[in-house]
């Protein structure tokens, strides 16, 4: 639920602003301000919010990182990033002029308590001079190994019960934690405990940027705002579900992180399981943070436990060797800088999962994701069972394809429903045709970046699109069990697919032995 914040809404104009989702002013502190994510995503998102008048004029952002920037130097660099990465560019000078007045920089190391005292001084000054109202939003945009130092030091700034020392509430405090949230279940628990020493659960916002994507949210709207799909959304009518997150890029200079994570932690443990949860969850009783996350957690917990399974029937991993992607040569994963020459890190994963509940018992969910695949495409496809009896058996219809509903997350955002239609002519010939909905054609607006939505939601105290503690734990429980099962197997022979192909050769057999096939995307 959105919170009303500390501003007293005492006139109709302010009421109207709140209706437009205007958050209260705050100091937003970005830890890791010189990093890639900050420049590619966070500042462009903040600028676009400012451009759309969705940030209050008092909004202030403080960059915190090791690099010794001068104030103006930092602002110039932020402007350059916005010009490079914003969905709307070049920067509109009048908006930038106002926006930049609220950008500050504090140099310091994450472990140095003195740096946090300097930060506190600046925040208090902003409260007085810029009217930031004692509200604070901390954003952890650093490599995960820095989280513990930062959270420990934030305890210096954050007094228990959020009060300013005089018994009066000093405003709200929130923390956004970037993924990965832990490396496995036990480290995720440790991080949770640490964060909870300073912040209550309702102050913690764990980002999974897939949840901020319009098309991902549309899965919920599609399922629960329309009466006609829910009756067929179950084991009686669905043959199987395929979730694909294909990327054409390689590891893009992030090998240090990737060597530790692999695709299973980088993509499956969060984005893919969230797509699965939204597709498979029961209808929540309300569109609020508690109800939606309760249902997602329930379905994640209902995924059939891994023990006693033949690992090879249910999981498949791969790693790319050299090849050609979209006309360009791509070196193999093991040739990337900072990758071990005999690395066994997975860059491709396919899974077959079953959900043990009344709705989905016996319906396989096939997941596949990988780097260096032929194209970038993300979709959730629900394949329905064939008609129970075909009266067209004697005609050229035996090969009629099953109905599929594909929800295209990116690119070409939209939906396709595939069904058989009669080919015009004297015979009964049937061909599969598509009924198409394209976002771009139906809504004449540029879709906001996921980070715009998520940062705004956080400021408003709206946590539906952030992952809850128990949800993250359910995700790690599953992923840990998969990784454990891999450890019991002989070492994989990597590389086993060429960059620019749809994963290892055996990926086809993985699904074909069930009498099914991957969708050609
Ligand atoms: C990130 C992963 O979370 O998601 C990256 O760490 C991946 O490896 C990225 O490339 C994909 O996001 P998107 O929005 O481009 O699909």
Image: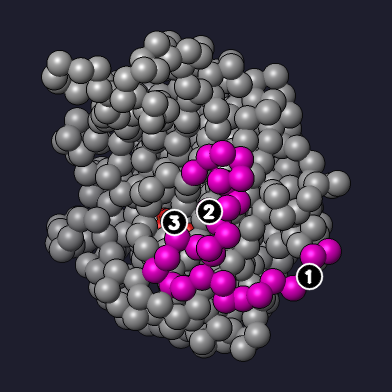
Number of the label disc, if any, that sits on residue 246: 3
Res. 9 visible in picture: no
Q: Which residue is at the far front? A: 394
- The residue where tag 1 is placed is 490
Mark 3 vs mark 1, CA separation in Å: 27 Å
Residue at 73% across, 29% down: 356
- Residue 257 in percent (x, y) is at 59, 74
Q: Earlier in the sequence, mark 3 or mark 2?
A: 3
Number of callouts: 3
Magenta residue check for 196: no
Q: Secondary structure at mark 3?
A: strand
Residue shown at 50% from the left, 84% from the top: 336
Examine the rendered structure and indicate whether residue 364 appears above or below residue 248: above
Q: Is residue 5 above or below residue 132?
A: above
Q: Which residues are magenta?
A: 488-517
The residue drawn where x is 13% and y is 19% is 425
Q: Nearer the viewer, mark 3 or mark 1?
A: 1
Residue that sits furthest to the right in the current view: 308
Image-quadrant location for residue 98 = bottom left
**Is residue 360 or residue 98 the one in the foreground?**
360
Quadrant holding the N terminus: top right
Mark 2 and mark 1 lie on one chain; the one further toward the N terminus is 1
């Amino acid at each position: 639920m959105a919170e009303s914040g500390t501003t007293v809404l005492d006139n109709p104009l302010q009421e109207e602003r709140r209706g437009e989702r205007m958050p209260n002013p705050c100091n937003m502190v970005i830890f890791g301000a010189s990093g890639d994510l900050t420049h590619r995503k966070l500042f462009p998102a903040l600028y676009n919010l400012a451009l759309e008048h969705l940030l209050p004029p008092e909004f202030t952002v403080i960059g915190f990182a090791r690099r010794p920037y001068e104030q103006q130097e930092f602002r110039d660099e932020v402007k350059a990033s916005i010009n490079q990465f914003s969905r709307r560019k070049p920067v509109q000078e009048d908006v930038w002029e106002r926006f930049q007045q609220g950008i500050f920089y504090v140099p310091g190391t994450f472990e140095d308590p003195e740096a946090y005292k300097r930060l506190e001084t600046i925040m208090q000054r902003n409260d007085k001079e810029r009217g930031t109202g004692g509200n604070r939003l901390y954003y952890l945009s650093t490599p995960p190994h820095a989280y513990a130092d930062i959270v420990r030091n934030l305890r210096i700034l954050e007094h228990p019960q959020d009060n300013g020392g005089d018994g009066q509430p000093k405003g709200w405090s929130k923390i956004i934690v970037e993924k990965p949230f832990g490396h496995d279940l036990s480290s995720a628990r440790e991080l949770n405990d640490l964060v909870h020493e300073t912040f209550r659960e309702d102050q913690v916002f764990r980002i999974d940027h897939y949840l901020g994507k319009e098309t991902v949210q549309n899965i919920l709207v599609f399922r629960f705002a329309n009466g006609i799909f829910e009756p067929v959304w179950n084991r009686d009518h669905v043959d199987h579900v395929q979730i694909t997150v294909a990327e054409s890029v390689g590891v893009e200079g992030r090998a240090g992180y990737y060597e530790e994570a692999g695709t299973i932690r980088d993509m499956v443990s969060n984005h893919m399981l969230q797509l699965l949860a939204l597709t498979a969850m029961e209808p929540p009783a309300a569109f609020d943070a508690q109800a939606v996350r309760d249902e997602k957690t329930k379905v994640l917990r209902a995924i059939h436990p891994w023990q006693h399974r033949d690992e090879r029937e249910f999981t498949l991993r791969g790693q790319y060797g050299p090849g050609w992607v979209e006309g360009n040569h791509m070196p193999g994963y093991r040739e990337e800088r900072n990758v071990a020459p005999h690395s066994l890190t997975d860059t491709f994963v396919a899974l077959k999962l079953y959900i043990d509940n009344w709705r989905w018992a016996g319906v396989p969910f096939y997941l596949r994701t990988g780097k260096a695949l032929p194209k970038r495409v993300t979709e959730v496809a629900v394949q329905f069972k064939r008609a129970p009896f075909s009266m067209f058996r004697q005609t050229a219809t035996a090969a009629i394809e099953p109905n599929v509903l594909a929800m295209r997350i990116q690119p070409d955002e939209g939906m396709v429903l595939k069904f058989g239609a009669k080919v015009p002519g004297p015979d009964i010939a049937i061909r599969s045709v598509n009924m198409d909905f394209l976002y771009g054609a139906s809504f004449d607006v540029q879709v906001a970046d996921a980070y715009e939505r998520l940062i705004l939601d956080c400021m408003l105290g709206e946590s539906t699109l952030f992952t809850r503690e128990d949800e993250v734990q359910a995700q790690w429980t599953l992923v840990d069990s998969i990784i454990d099962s891999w450890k019991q197997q002989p070492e994989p022979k990597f590389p086993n697919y060429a960059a620019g192909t749809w994963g290892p050769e055996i990926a086809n057999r993985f699904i074909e032995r069930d009498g099914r096939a991957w969708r050609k995307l």
